[in-house]
Amino acid sequence: MTLLQALVMAVLQGVTELFPISSLGHAVIAPALLGWRNVDENAPGFLPFLAVMHLGTAIALLAFFWRDWWSFAVSILRFRDPAGAADRRLFWRVVVATIPAVILGALFEKVLKQGFGAPRLAALFLMVNGILLLAAERFRHGASRPLSGMSVLDAVIIGFCQCLALIPGLSRSGATMAGGYLRGFDHEQAARFSFLTATPIILGAVVLEAPKLVKAHETLGPLSLIAGLAAGLTALASVWALMTWFRTREVRGFAPFALYCVAAGAGALLLLSRG
């Protein structure tokens, strides 16, 4: 992989990981569309390379939502203080929502990795991702409620929605945002909870893939560090832009991303089929 290819992948990762348009799907489709024959998604070093870019994204999320994580830490340390009850409650909802993806990801890791080398399948599921976002907008009913009212059932449902992202082309942020939105939270609050649950998932993936990255150091080490930095800076800009968008566009806030996924997936499928 060249430096230019690594930077392109990093910027793509920083945008698509947080926007509800599937970073994994784009990581699988982009090399095939661009004719990057030297980029092998099934190579042992590819997933660790993605993990380092995800680390940059996780750091960006920690930087943007530092107040939430600081409040969580303080409320846990002062567990007898009634003033921190709301923060402790939300923290444990984040933990609950994280568990399903951890379990299913560990159980089906080998099977799911086979999808990394299937760009046509990723393009198809990118279209499905767009349809799911449109469906969430269509079938949501009732008034919005605050995250402080999230139940354990809400967290479990959002957690299982997060598992859809194990399939290339289905967005983790999109699935959790749609799940939260359907459970009665507005776009902004659903996005906030989605990003809070993303942080432990991403950091956990990095920890699991770190040993493999060490083995691939001779070919990917320097590129991984550069790509991780680029992905982090891009992600920081992306999360700011997305939260601003949802704050001002409550009506059909998912629509642009849904339409993009359907169009991009269909276009990629057409081009890949011709190739």
Image: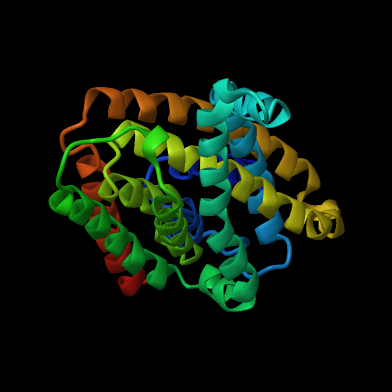
Tell me which residue sits at (43%, 34%) in the image. Answer: 192
x, y percent for residue 227? 65, 39
Q: How many marks?
A: 0
Which sits in the foreground, 35 or 52? 52
Residue 1 visible, this orientation: no
Q: Residue furthest bottom?
A: 111
Residue 71 visible, this orientation: yes
Q: Quadrant of residue 135?
A: bottom left
Left or right: 149 as drawn, with respect to 64: left
Tell me which residue sits at (35%, 66%) in the image. Answer: 125
Which color scheme is applied? rainbow
210 versus 77 height, above or below: below
29 versus 239 height, above or below: below
Q: Quadrant of residue 103?
A: bottom right
x, y percent for residue 168? 46, 64
x, y percent for residue 99? 58, 58
Tell me which residue sits at (37%, 49%) in the image. Answer: 174
109 versus 193 height, above or below: below
Left or right: 246 as drawn, with respect to 240: left
Left or right: 152 as drawn, with respect to 102: left
Left or right: 77 as drawn, with respect to 188: right
- Where is the C terminus found, in terms of image quarters? bottom left
x, y percent for residue 35? 49, 60
Tell me which residue sits at (52%, 33%) in the image. Answer: 235
Which sits in the foreground, 64 or 19? 64
Which sits in the foreground, 34 or 228? 228
